[in-house]
Amino acid sequence: MSENAIAIKGLCRKLDRLQLGPVDLELEAGYVVALVGPNGSGKSSLLRMLINTMAPDSGTIHLLGRELDAEDIALKQRIGYVPETAEWAQLGYATIEDLRELYAYWYSGWNAEGYEALLARYELEPKLRLDHLSKGMQRKLAFVQALAYDPDILLMDEPTAGLDPFAWRMMLEDVTAFMERGRKTVLFATHILDEVRRIADYVVFFYEGKVLGCYEKDALLDGWKVFWINAPQRAAGLPGVLEIEVKEGAAVGKVVSAAPRATELALQQAGLTVTRTLGLELDEILSYLIREHKVGTTAVKRPR
Amino acid sequence: MDKGGQIPIQLSPDSAEPMYHQIEVQLRALILSGRLPEGTLLPSIREFAAELACSVITIRRVYQDLENEGILRTKQGTGTFVAQVGTGERERYRKQAVAEALREAVQTGLQVQCTQDELRALFEEALAQAFAARGINGGSES
């Protein structure tokens, strides 16, 4: 148990348009985990429950081996959070410098030097007014603030939305650097699949308030391929074959496989020549998984 | 992050081979061919993963496999290094890599219905071309 940075059990919460949960999820320390799913699937609500700004109806959350508790200040010090929209201005803080004072006071792990360096790196001036910050700047600032007290778990809600490509790359680099500092854990919700590909170790697919699956990212990408072959109809029923697509009158078509090595072997044995093999994008894989989920059966046996 | 010493590895998502296998094959080739000499410090697992856009799980597996083969070694707290590779092993590898490439070439030929004789002729032709381009006969250069 203590190995898990995040352990969620039977978590439920009634939302406006959605019954979230029951969510069961265990995330081991030392990994970057991407939370991916369509809009309105409950990703932000899940993150809010993890930082205790939204109460679940039932279920438990353990962070770093301790049950989540609003009074547990020591635990709070070890959790970083980059929200989708920051509400500092409403809290009555005028400038970036005001906010720094608050954080430096509250967080025992506050690293003044590290903070200054990050602030400069993201081109944020201490005098800037919080209510004048663009969305991208707000995200950069929230990210800098969270990193500056060196938490053990970093939770982020679409942290790179609205960032220019330079700041985007910087943030990914800084997440990597953060992970190098020891047994850290990052859980971030995102729609940007390129960043999932680049920095995530695991992908949690979230759909209609439920976890569709938690996958090792590379195994997921390795586990789905498209083969272009002649007479693709002949691949029907072969191991791993999920779907066959062929345009009318075309000799060559696509065979989508959820077990590429088994499929490749079977194609060879059947004397079918593969002209091209292509990887699938994560969103394509997700839509296949959603479809499988809707049908309620696993149409394809995936040998491990 | 901005450290030098990048390892030239090319991952293809468009291959049915799993990522760890692609990396392992290429890293082994770099070591056994001597392009990564003994003592070379490899990137940390996290760095290498970021460089190749793959997960740390994959890199850890590659490092472990190659350590078990004896061509990498990890020193606690300092990192993973290229180990000493015996000349026998190098020699064996040298031929193995060529044999593998040839097997692949044969497969390509079979895909377009080449006969054995055609394949042989193509091989001779390629050989002749290569040596003609170098302006030498079949010397024992490597």
Image (cartoon, coloured by chain):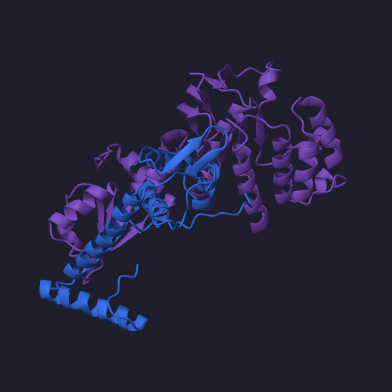
Above or below for A267 versus A174: below
Q: Nearer the viewer, residue B3 or A14?
A: B3
Farthest residue toward the right?
Answer: A127
- At x 70% / y 50%, what residue is drawn? A136
Above or below for A22 versus A239: above
Identify the colour of chain A in the image: purple
Could you tell me residue B31's position as x and y percent?
42, 52
- Can residue A153 be seen here? The reply is yes
- At x 46% / y 37%, what residue is drawn? A208
Who's blue, chain-wise? B
Q: Nearer the viewer, residue A124 or B142?
A: B142
- At x 19% / y 68%, what residue is drawn? B111
* Quadrant of the rendering where the C terminus of chain A is positioned: top left
- At x 66% / y 51%, what residue is drawn? A170
Q: Nearer the viewer, residue B126 or B140?
A: B140
Seen in the image, is B118 located left or right of residue A253? left
